[in-house]
Image: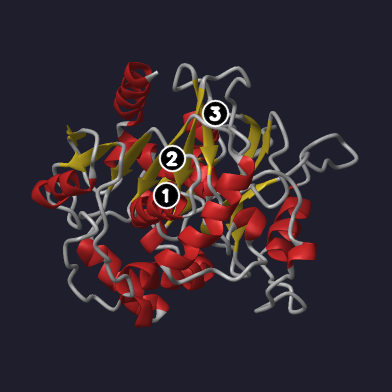
Amino acid sequence: MLHYRGRVDRQVKISGHRVELEEIEAVVRRVPGARACVAIPVVTAQGEVRSIALFYTTDEAPPRGDDDPLAVRAQLARQLPGYMTPSVILRVEAFPVTANGKVDSAALLRLARSASRPSRARAGRTAPASERPAGSPWLPFGAAPEAGIRLLCLPHAGAGATVYRSWGAGSLDGVAVCPVQPPGREKRRREAALTSAAGLARLLAAEVVKDVRPPYALFGHSTGALVAFELSRQIRRVGGPAPVHLFVSGRPAPQLPLPRTRLSGLSVPELAAVLRKLGGTPEEVLNDEGLLARIHPLLIADFQVNEEYAYQPEDPLPIRVTVFGATRDAGTTLDQAAGWEVQAGNGFRLHTLDGGHFAVFDKAPEVHEQIAKSLRAQS
C-alpha cells in the first residue's frame, strides 16, 4: 500500500509558474547578517497560492525600527524573477514552533497580518523630541571601531539607512560606513518626513556638528546626493568641521534645471506607471501594490525635496567631489553628472559605472574600491 505524503521539494505554483521555496531561502541565506529563513506560501480561501511570505532572523538584532526588509527584497530582486519575490518580508526574533518542534507557519502568517495593520493611535502623528528614539544616528553597520574615517551615507528617495547595511560588512577597509537616517523612516518613522532639502540640511547639520568627530566624508545617492550637497554647504555656514570628500551618484548637478515631473502629486497607481516609464525602480517593487502603498507617503515627500529645490549660488565646496555616473541612468546623463565639477573647489572626478540608476549598489565592490582609494589618498 502506498501513502502520499506530499512533495519533498516544497514546490508551489504561482500564476502558472512553478516556484521552489528552497531556492528563495537559499538566496536569503546569502544576504549579509541573515541567519535563518523560511518561505511560506500564502493560500487563498479557494485554495490557490497567490504569493509567498518570507520570514528571517539575523545574527544581531538591528536598532529599534531599523529592520527594513527592502535590503532583503533588493537582494532577491537581483537573483530571482519577479513572480518568485515574496509579497511579505518580515524579520522575526525567532521562529515559533508547534508542539512537534516544527516551524509554526500559521503563527508566522498571523504575525505578518498583524504587522501589516497600521496603528491608528500613531497614524499621522509626529512625535515630540522627548519621544524620539534614543541613541546616536552615526553608528556604523559592521565596521570596526578603529576605522580611521567615517562615511556618512544618505539614502535615495523612499529608502532608509538599511539600504547601506551590506556596505558596512568590512567592504571598505579602514572606513566606518555610517548611514544617515532622515526623519520619517525606520527608527525615525514617527517624525514628520521633511520636503525641503534646505530644511533637511539644517536639521542634519546640527546633528553632524554635535555628534560626528572628524575626519568624515559624505555619500548620497539620488535625492540623497542633493541632501548631502546641501548638508555640506550648511555645515560650512555654521562653521562646523567640513567633510574631507563628497561622493554622489544618481542625480544631475544641483545647479542644472530639472524637468518638472510633479511626481509628488500622483496616486499610487499613477506613481507606479511613471516610475516604470522612467526606469530605475526594481520591477518587483512596482508590482507590489501593498509595498507601494506603504512607501507612497515617503516617496511623495522625497520627490517634493527635488521638485521644490531652488539652487542658490555659493562658492564651490572647499573639498574634493567624486561623482559615480551610470551609463544607462534614465534620470541623469553623464554630461549632467559631469556638471558637479563646478561645485568642487579642491578637485573633481567622474567615475563611470556600467549600469542604470542603481549602479552604485549593483557595482558595490567597484564603488567601495574607489571610495576607499580616494580616502586613503587624502589621509
C-alpha distance separating marks 2 and 1: 6 Å
Where residue 144 appears, as percent x and y from the top left, is 60, 20
Q: Up-down: is 200 above or below 61?
A: below
Where residue 298 appears, as percent x and y from the top left, is 49, 68
For the residue marked with disc 3, what is the amino acid? Pro
Q: Which residue is mark 3?
A: 32
Q: For residue 270, which quarter of the picture?
A: bottom left
Q: Nearer the viewer, residue 343 or 262?
A: 343
Q: Earlier in the sequence, mark 2 or mark 1?
A: 1
Specify few, some or many for label 2: CA neighbours under 10 Å numbering under 14, 14-19, or 20 or more. Answer: many
Residue that sits furthest to the front in the current view:
239
For the residue marked with disc 2, what is the amino acid? Ala
Is residue 27 visible to the viewer in this orientation of the structure?
Answer: no
Q: Nearer the viewer, residue 183 or 343?
A: 343
Is residue 32 visible to the viewer in this orientation of the structure?
Answer: yes
Q: Which mark is residue 242?
A: 2
Q: Which residue is mark 1?
A: 236
For the residue marked with disc 1, what is the amino acid? Arg
Q: Earlier in the sequence, mark 2 or mark 3?
A: 3
Q: Nearer the viewer, residue 319 or 337?
A: 319
